[in-house]
Amino acid sequence: MELYFSPFGGILPRPRRLQRRGSLWGGWHSLSANRALAAVKQWHRRIYERRLLAGFSDRDRRDLALTVADIGQEIAKPFWRG
């Protein structure tokens, strides 16, 4: 089994080549361009929402029935975690 470094990190077994020539990832096709774009959009949305959450006042927090610990826990998450 031949291993290679994936463009998204980690070491994966080399996949079978696509039938079409000129693949964007050189044969690595488990993640389509649409799925990659959707993931990046979701990451940006999470970053935006967590920055908004960090700026909530005490009144905003009470309106949503959130504690300071709830907000701190959500803000501490990295953007790639839901």
Image (tube, rainbow, N blue to C red):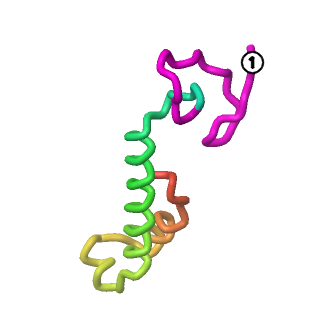
Please tell me how crowded label 1 is: few (under 14), some (14-19), or many (20+) other residues with Cα within 10 Å: few
Left/right of residue 20 with respect to residue 6 in the rendered view: left
Taking depth in this image into account, of 42 and 59 the one nearest to the observer is 42
Which x, y percent locates residue 53?
A: 39, 74
- Looking at the image, is 82 positioned above or below residue 58? above
Q: Which secondary structure is most common in the magenta stretch?
A: loop
Report which quarter residue 64 is drawn in.
bottom left
Q: Is residue 34 magenta?
A: no
Instruction: Please tell me which residue is depicted at 54% across the width and 66% down the height of the picture.
Output: 76
Taking depth in this image into account, of 44 and 75 the one nearest to the observer is 44
On the image, numbered disc 1 is attached to which residue? 2
Q: Is residue 20 magenta?
A: yes
Tell me how many marks there are: 1
Which x, y percent locates residue 63?
A: 24, 76
Taking depth in this image into account, of 69 and 56 the one nearest to the observer is 56
Which x, y percent locates residue 35?
A: 40, 40
Instruction: Please tell me which residue is depicted at 45% across the width and 65% down the height of the picture.
Output: 47
Left/right of residue 60 with respect to residue 8 in the rendered view: left
- Looking at the image, is 76 positioned above or below residue 81? below
The kind of secondary structure element at disc 1 is loop
Left/right of residue 14 with respect to residue 21 in the rendered view: right
Which x, y percent locates residue 62?
A: 29, 78
Instruction: Please tell me which residue is depicted at 57% across the width and 28% down the height of the picture.
Output: 28
Instruction: Please tell me which residue is depicted at 43% across the width and 39% down the height of the picture.
Output: 33
Report which quarter residue 5 is drawn in.
top right
Start-end of magenta stretch: 1-25
Residue type marked 1 = Glu
Looking at this view, name the residue that lies furthest to the front.
Answer: 21
Report which quarter residue 57 is drawn in.
bottom left
Left/right of residue 42 with respect to residue 28 in the rendered view: left
